[in-house]
Amino acid sequence: MTRSVLPAILLATLPVLGLAAAPQAGASGDVVVYTITSDGTLSTVTYRDQANNTQQLTNVAAPWSLTFISQGSVPNYSVSARSTGTQLSCIITVNGQVVDRDSDNDGVADVDCHQDWDDD
């Protein structure tokens, strides 16, 4: 009898444990999306990640995009890129709103998008 009762108790408590561990909707930071488009390969992409750390990628296929939920108490969102192509653009959206965009088509394609507390 102990054998059949123990699995039943475990199965009954698993959903409760899962609900307690699940993150609460709305309790997280901003939803941030970085988007880079180009007609060439992205030789470098440098960005601030969800913990506000600088990351760099090299030789990335375009288009490139990254979505994350911010964890920093003082947001500092930025993404920059250089391309082997002639056209390049970047966009940052925060909670669905475009906060910065940049484009370049002058032959040396580089862009820089950023949004921080000082931007309005």
Image (cartoon, rainbow, N blue to C red):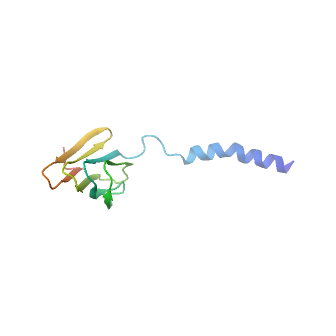
Instruction: Please name the residue shown 25% across and 52% down the image.
Output: 40
Q: Is residue 74 left or right of residue 106?
A: right
Residue situated in front as seen by the camera: 54 or 16: 54
Q: Where is residue 17? Give x, y as percent.
A: 62, 47
- The mark total stands at 0
Q: Is residue 13 left or right of residue 51?
A: right
Instruction: Please name the residue shown 55% across and 48% down the image.
Output: 21
In the picture, which quadrant includes the C terminus?
A: top left
Compared with 56, 34 (above or below) is above
Q: Where is residue 59? Give x, y as percent.
A: 31, 59
Instruction: Please name the residue shown 81% across and 46% down the image.
Output: 5
Q: Where is residue 23? Give x, y as percent.
A: 49, 46
Q: Where is residue 49? Give x, y as percent.
A: 34, 56
Outermost residue, top direction? 96
Outermost residue, left direction? 106
